[in-house]
């Protein structure tokens, strides 16, 4: 029987911000618009900090996923009917929050396979509504792989988000354990395809699932080979006892060392920290790489 590792102090986050006005405002706006956030559904450790900064990562297409990744806390129940009013609700929330940068992600919807959709039509509608209602807002999308369907990806191309993000999540060797319904080569192809369409491309992966340092370096160079622009690297934290155990808690210094390795050996802009997640410092990173 595997022994669960003790959570280090540097990964324990404060909940002191739960009572502040900004946190309550975000929760109220999300509730009024019937919106989901990955902050909440995936038990993100940065939820309190983000909400208290009047920001959140919107999760569209419902809160039930058709995949069963062994590290993820998002629910795997039967997916809901797509809410056609969601684009308008997101635009309303973005305006009320006064966002300059908006991150849109979603559950995976393999059930929406008709007409080469996989949720891409809804992504297009959300981005299109934001472009019309919030023309000054920069938009980052963090999409599923759409089963590698190029017609679905071309809908995202047509919608013209400012940043395209798709998480590689872990090394190829661990996909059969951590991402049984996903495919490493397919995810890599999605990122390659969108880079060829001249998007700023971004991806992220976790440490602590059983990889070693040479495999981490190999993954970094694979991502550099497809000319990835931004990578986020954070510590995997087990959401519950039914999820994969943590194989190792990397130290803060190890994250700094990895960030330096990426800076010195690739053209990728790295964001590496124990609590780094896909949209961690997203706006700040965008500003830096675009020199705005």
Image (cartoon, grey):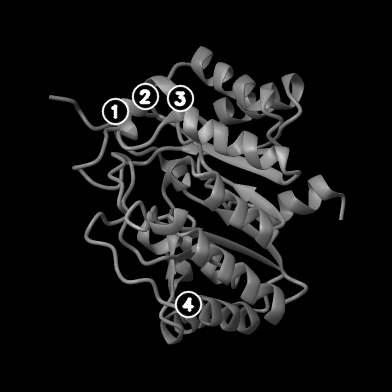
Residue 171, label in figure:
3
Q: In which quarter of the image is residue 211?
A: top left
Using residue 270 as the reference point, say whether residue 185 is left or right of it: left
Task: Check if mark 2's residue and mark 3's residue have beta carbons within 8 Å.
Answer: yes
User: Label 4 to label 3, Cα distance in Å?
Assistant: 34 Å
Task: Check if mark 1's residue and mark 3's residue have beta carbons within 8 Å.
Answer: no
Q: Which residue is drawn at 79% across and 53% down?
A: 287
User: Label 2 to label 4, Cα distance in Å?
Assistant: 35 Å
Mark whose residue sits in front, 1 or 4:
4
User: Label 2 to label 3, Cα distance in Å?
Assistant: 6 Å
Q: Residue at x 80, y 45 (%)?
A: 289
Task: Check if mark 1's residue and mark 4's residue have beta carbons within 8 Å.
Answer: no
Q: Residues within 10 Å of mark 4 (few under 14, many from 20)?
A: many
Q: Residues within 10 Å of mark 3 (few under 14, many from 20)?
A: many
Q: How crowded is mark 1: few (under 14 residues within 10 Å), some or many (20 or more)?
A: some
Q: Is residue 63 above or below residue 23?
A: above
Mark whose residue sits in front, 2 or 4:
4
- Provide the residue designation for mark 2: 174
Rendered-image quadrant of the N terminus: top left
């Amino acid at each position: 029987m595997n022994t669960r590792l003790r959570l280090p102090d540097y990964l324990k986050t404060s909940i002191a911000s739960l009572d502040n006005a900004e946190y309550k405002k975000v929760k109220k706006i999300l509730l009024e618009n019937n919106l989901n956030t990955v902050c909440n559904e995936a038990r993100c450790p940065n939820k309190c900090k983000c909400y208290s900064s009047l920001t959140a990562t919107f999760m569209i297409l419902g809160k039930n996923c058709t995949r069963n990744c062994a590290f993820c806390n998002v629910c795997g129940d039967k997916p809901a009917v797509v809410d056609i009013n969601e684009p308008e609700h997101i635009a309303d929330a973005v305006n009320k929050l006064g966002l300059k940068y908006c991150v849109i992600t979603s559950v995976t919807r393999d059930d929406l396979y008709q007409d080469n959709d996989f949720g891409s039509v809804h992504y297009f509608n959300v981005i299109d509504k934001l472009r019309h209602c919030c023309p000054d807002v920069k938009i980052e999308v963090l999409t599923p792989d759409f089963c590698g369907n190029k017609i679905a990806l071309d809908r995202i191309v047509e919608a013209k988000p400012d940043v395209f993000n798709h998480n590689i999540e872990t090394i190829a060797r661990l996909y059969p354990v951590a991402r049984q319904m996903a495919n490493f080569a397919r995810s890599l192809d999605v990122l390659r395809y969108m880079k060829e369409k001249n998007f700023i491309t971004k991806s992220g992966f976790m440490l602590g699932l059983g990889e070693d340092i040479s495999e981490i370096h190999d993954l970094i160079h694979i991502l550099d080979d497809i000319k990835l622009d931004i990578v986020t690297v954070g510590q995997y934290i087990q959401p519950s006892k039914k999820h994969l155990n943590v194989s190792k808690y990397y130290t803060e210094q190890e994250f700094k060392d990895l960030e330096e390795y990426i800076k010195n050996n690739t053209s990728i802009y790295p964001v590496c920290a124990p609590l780094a997640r896909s949209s961690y410092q997203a706006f700040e990173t965008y500003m830096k790489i675009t020199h705005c």
